[in-house]
Image (cartoon, rainbow, N blue to C red):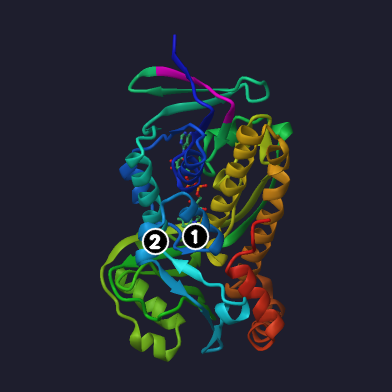
Amino acid sequence: MPTTQHIPVVIIGAGPAGLLLGQLLYKAGIDNIILEQRSPDYVLSRIRAGVLEQVSMDLLRQAGAAKNMDAHGLHHHGIELLFGGQRHRIDLHGLTGGKYVMVYGQTEVTRDLMEVRAAEGLTTVYEALHVQPRDYDSGHPRVRYEKDGELHEIHCDFIAGCDGFHGASRASIAPERIRHFEKVYPFGWLGLMSDTPPVSEELIYANSERGFALCSQRSLTRSRYYLQVPLTDKVENWTDEAFWDELKRRLDPEARERLMTGPSIEKSIAPLRSYVAEPMRFGRMFLAGDAAHIVPPTGAKGLNLAASDVGYLARAFVDYYQNKSTHGIDQYSEQCLRRVWKAERFSWWMTTLMHSFPEEGAFHTKVQEAELDYVVNSRAASTSLAENYVGLPMR
Ligand SMILES: Cc1cc2nc3c(=O)[nH]c(=O)nc-3n(C[C@H](O)[C@H](O)[C@H](O)COP(=O)(O)OP(=O)(O)OC[C@H]3O[C@@H](n4cnc5c(N)ncnc54)[C@H](O)[C@@H]3O)c2cc1C
């Protein structure tokens, strides 16, 4: 027989979505537990996103987990688009009435959230195996899991499925209740992290004949660079030297000259995918973050969407517990999906604008060149890019 207890909200997954939700609920006086299949070290070893929108910054502040971000995050007021050998600045700040993005790594966000959770004495069960959400269509949902060979069961009011693309929450839903929308791109991103100063103060998105490149960063001393590579490529095929050589070929002469190279501290290939699951609510279980949707990283939206989903979900739970209203819960899926699809559109558009698609032929390339020219020379087009890049507001 499993050990049992009752906790109002069970959160599955201790990525940014789960940890942020836990903290927002705690601040509102709503008890919760997080079940995570991996160890804390494993969770922190994943190198992922690095650009935060205003909405994410605000939610981290609301959660009481923004001290380090505010002290060490870098305010970025613009990005550069490089094409035809020339760089063109998009003035995010000027075009959006003073908005900006914050460069602060996902690993740091996760660590900050873990630390505030531990300091408040809140429970996260790491290495919780075989997590199974059950009975979420009834008024009495339960979550089962195994820890150190023992079976546990938690009875709860709600389950938050924050367990990423391969998690147990979405997998538990009967196929006929869920719709999947997916686009897989014919390339991936080879990423390299190095303890070298960034090549430029702002991010450079490069469209070159040899493929896309991104010069990103995590701090003034840590850089993150990416190259578009075929899906069939393997990270073992890329020495650090080969990476730096190829990156230089995709940059303009000034950036090539300034680029400081060094040994990689991480190197990996990520496939690019657009994906949405609809709806995002199933009775008393709610999907949030990568459990419900994936965007290609070109628009820097993945982590930010995870944050806005749990922002909506926290509001809905607060409304339920404090005002006995189910309005937020009933609106959750529709409200999230409106924002999700706008971010999906923007991420797809940025990906299509900046990458090479040789299989699409010369017509595609010419249209792409025309669109790039339009984006940097039309204030309306630059503004559209800027307002999506800094993030659309949460309604
Ligand atoms: C290689 C890579 C690079 C990326 N780069 C960028 C980028 O540059 N910019 C950007 O905006 N986004 C990027 N993303 C996307 C961004 O990292 C994600 O959108 C973000 O991590 C989503 O957070 P999440 O909490 O929803 O999911 P996750 O971070 O995936 O967290 C889910 C958690 O649930 C746990 N879990 C999974 N299954 C179970 C289970 N059965 N039981 C219990 N726990 C479970 C996992 O171990 C994990 O800790 C990248 C993603 C990847 C994979």
The numbered mark at residue 69 is 2
* 199, above or below 333, in the image: below
- Which one is earlier in the sequence, the residue at label 1 or at label 2? 1
View extreme (top): residue: 1
The answer to which image quadrant residue 50 occupies is bottom left
Check the picture and name the quadrant holding the N terminus. Answer: top left
Q: Which quarter shows the C terminus?
A: bottom right
Q: Label for residue 173?
A: none
Question: Seen in the image, is 10 located left or right of residue 324?
Answer: left
Residue 215 visible in the current orientation: no
Where 49 sits versus 256, above or below? above
Query: Measuring 59% from the left and 69% from the top, which residue is drawn there?
Result: 389
Question: Dot 2, how many residues are within 10 Å of its Cα: few (below 14), some (14-19), or many (20+)?
Answer: many
Please tell me how crowded label 1 is: few (under 14), some (14-19), or many (20+) other residues with Cα within 10 Å: many
Q: Which mark is residue 57?
A: 1
| Region of the chain picked out in magenta, as a range | 151-158
Name the quadrant containing residue 394: bottom right
Q: Position of residue 100 (x, y in %)?
A: 52, 72
Image spot of residue 168 (x, y percent): 53, 33
In this image, 163 relative to 327: left or right? left
Q: Main secondary structure of the magenta part?
A: strand
- Is the residue marked 1 within 8 Å of ligand 1, measured from its CB? no
Q: Does 157 lie within the magenta span?
A: yes
Kind of residue at disc 1 = Met
CA gap, disc 1 to disc 2?
8 Å
User: Horizontal and vertical percent for residue 29?
Assistant: 50, 36
Q: Is there any visible trace of residue 71 in the rendered image? A: yes
The residue most toward the left is 263
Closest to the observer, 165 or 103: 103
What type is the residue that disc 2 sits on?
Met
